[in-house]
Image (cartoon, rainbow, N blue to C red):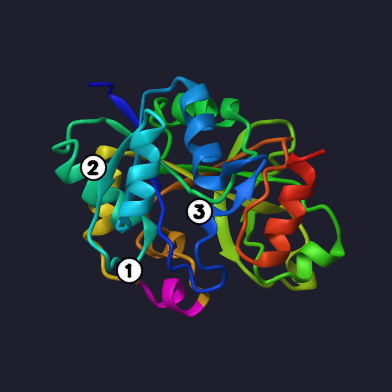
Amino acid sequence: MSSTVVIIPSRLQAKRLPNKPLKIINQKEMILHVHNLAMESKVGEVLVTTPDKIIFDLIIKNGGKSFISNNIHETGTDRVFEAFQNFYSNNPQIIINLQGDMPNLDPKDISRIKNYILKGNCDICTLASNIENSEDIKDKNIVKVITKKSINNANFSEAFDFKREVSREDDKNIYHHIGIYGFTSEALIRYVNLKRSKLELERNLEQMRAMENGMKVHVGFTDSKPLSVDTEKDFLKIKKVMEK
């Protein structure tokens, strides 16, 4: 078994865009695009964890590995932890939680997450890119991360805050957060055993649980522009990009 695993949580019952893992881009389901780019990264074994048999069967049919999780989880990371605990028996040392709705992520960014978390500088690491325009700043579906230092030179900095809405006072070191997280096994176990935090619930951002409990989160810059699909508008946008 690899010491690093990429676990992709995926389910059909997303509130804003039901059935999105099965949305077709270039004659292929979105979850297959994400699974395949994770395989291309070659950082370790790839597993899709899902409560939905149709997703499980799709991954298995296409030569991948999948795990049927419990139907109800409070967060995607809790679903990842169930697979880490039950499918992998808590053995991997590095766990990469890759969201199943970023079908144009650069596989090299997954490698960057692995390489950085191995340095031991933080509990959790994640990525961000530049915010494209003022519309993205106002869009509550786009999560923003504020870092303590600039990360434009492909370096990492400690996260200061994560928000859906930002004000003019927050205009320094604001980036578009990308939904990928690298955990050490110790950090993942600690995280899921913490109670859901105040800001996690208020903002609907699970990373706030780590922030509010003093876990060190570092953010790296990527100049690629992976798009996250949360709404039908997002899906049409990424479909247009990927089908050019």
Residue placed under numbered mark 3 in the picture: 21
Name the amino acid type tagged 1: Glu
Q: Is residue 224 above or below residue 3?
A: below
Residue drawn at x 42%, y 48% is 216
Q: Is residue 166 magenta?
A: no
In the rendered structure, which segment of residues is drawn in magenta? 197-202
Residue placed under numbered mark 2 in the picture: 84
Q: How many angstroms separate mark 2 from mark 3 (CA)?
A: 21 Å
Mark closer to the chain start, 2 or 3: 3
Residue drawn at x 40%, y 42% is 58
Q: Does residue 142 appear to the left or right of 206 in the view shown?
A: right
> Disc 3 on helix, strand or loop?
helix
Residue placed under numbered mark 1 in the picture: 74
Crowdedness near tag 2: few (<14), some (14–19) or many (≥20) residues, C-alpha within 10 Å: many
Q: How many angstroms separate mark 3 from mark 1 (CA)?
A: 19 Å
Crowdedness near tag 3: few (<14), some (14–19) or many (≥20) residues, C-alpha within 10 Å: many
